[in-house]
């Protein structure tokens, strides 16, 4: 059957929301599913979690932005082979696969085959100009279609790559069907700023094919089921709050 988010459902729609995914995708009922609720006072310090080196994030590239009906897909990332990117009002996910694999599907057969980096967005009094190219592109694909962005740098979205040494890590899954449990999640403590005006524009411009706003496109949090969440800092400094983190974008990259 067709899967969807709760916010997509209408009286005439028979698609299955997150709580029904397991009927068609058994892995969605597994024991290491994502997302989870991180209780910062219960995380475990791991001194081996050193700052992450970002490679290829400053390369200038041309990308294609497409409204596929339930999300925004960004592709043709020249410097990141076999790459794609998806934009949701949630958070930024950048997904890397092990070098020995050539596709994301192949890496999913390895329980630690995929590394996903998550970045939260936080409403700020100042505009984040680095987001404007993507925001402008969203206005050109409100309901469907595609458009190009030239001179794009992935690193621009992160403001400063040096600010992301603090993070949490846990073993999880894809947050959409088929919910494969092959993801090592790294969630950064430093949020990426976005202004309220920018947030309002994004909400107006990201629409489902039905014309409804593309909001509430997330999976509810799942049980930890005995898993340990690790932190790169001995003292957790940032509380991840779904109340203050009002905007997120999801970017999924398949790399070799």
Image (tube, rainbow, N blue to C red):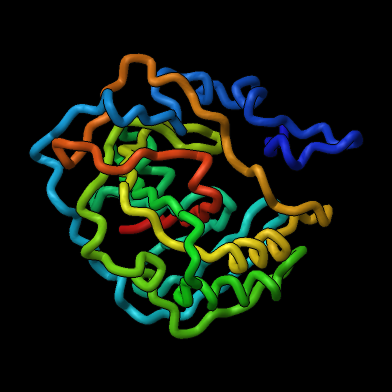
Residue reaching furthest to the bottom:
151
Q: Please state, as top left, top right, bottom left or bottom right, where the C terminus lies in the image.
A: bottom left
Nearer-the-camera pick, 107 or 235: 235
At x 70% / y 75%, what residue is drawn? 140
Please identify the quarter of the rendering in which residue 239 is found.
top left
Residue 35 location in percent, x, y? 46, 33
Q: Does 11 sit left or right of 153 as displayed? A: right
At x 28% / y 70%, what residue is drawn? 56
Instruction: Tell me if residue 103 can be seen.
Output: no
Please identify the quarter of the rendering in which residue 146 is found.
bottom right
Please identify the quarter of the rendering in which residue 168 is found.
top left
Classify 45 as above or below 226.
below
Residue 109 location in percent, x, y? 36, 34
At x 53% / y 77%, what residue is drawn? 133
Residue 26 location in percent, x, y? 55, 21
Q: Please state, as top left, top right, bottom left or bottom right, where the N terminus lies in the image.
A: top right
Classify 189 as above or below 53.
above
Nearer-the-camera pick, 231 or 250: 231
Residue reaching furthest to the right:
12
Instruction: Tell me if residue 190 can be seen.
Output: yes
Residue reaching furthest to the front:
125
Nearer-the-camera pick, 89 or 94: 89
Q: How many marks?
A: 0
Q: Does 183 sit left or right of 176 as displayed? A: left
At x 44% / y 62%, what residue is drawn? 193
């Amino acid at each position: 059957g067709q899967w969807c988010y709760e916010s997509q459902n209408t009286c005439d729609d028979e698609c299955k929301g997150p709580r029904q995914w397991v009927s068609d995708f058994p892995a969605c009922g597994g024991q290491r599913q994502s997302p989870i609720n991180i209780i910062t006072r219960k995380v475990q310090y791991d001194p081996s979690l050193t700052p992450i080196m970002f490679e290829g994030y400053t390369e200038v590239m041309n990308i294609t932005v497409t409204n596929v009906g339930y999300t925004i897909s960004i592709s043709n990332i020249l410097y990141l082979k076999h790459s794609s990117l998806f934009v949701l009002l949630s958070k930024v996910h950048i997904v890397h696969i092990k070098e020995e694999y050539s596709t994301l599907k192949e890496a999913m057969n390895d329980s630690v085959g995929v590394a996903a980096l998550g970045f939260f967005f936080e409403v700020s009094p100042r505009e984040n100009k680095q987001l404007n190219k993507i925001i402008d592109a969203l206005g050109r694909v409100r309901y469907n279609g595609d458009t190009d962005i030239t001179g794009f740098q992935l690193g621009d979205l992160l403001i400063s790559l040096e600010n992301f040494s603090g993070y949490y890590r846990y073993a999880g899954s894809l947050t959409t069907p088929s919910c494969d449990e092959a993801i090592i999640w790294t969630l950064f403590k430093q949020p990426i700023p976005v202004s309220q005006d920018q947030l309002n524009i994004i909400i107006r411009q990201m629409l489902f094919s039905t014309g409804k706003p593309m909001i509430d496109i997330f999976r509810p949090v799942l049980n930890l089921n005995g898993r340990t969440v690790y932190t790169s800092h001995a003292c957790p400094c940032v509380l991840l709050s779904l109340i203050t983190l009002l905007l997120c974008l999801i970017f999924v990259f398949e790399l070799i």
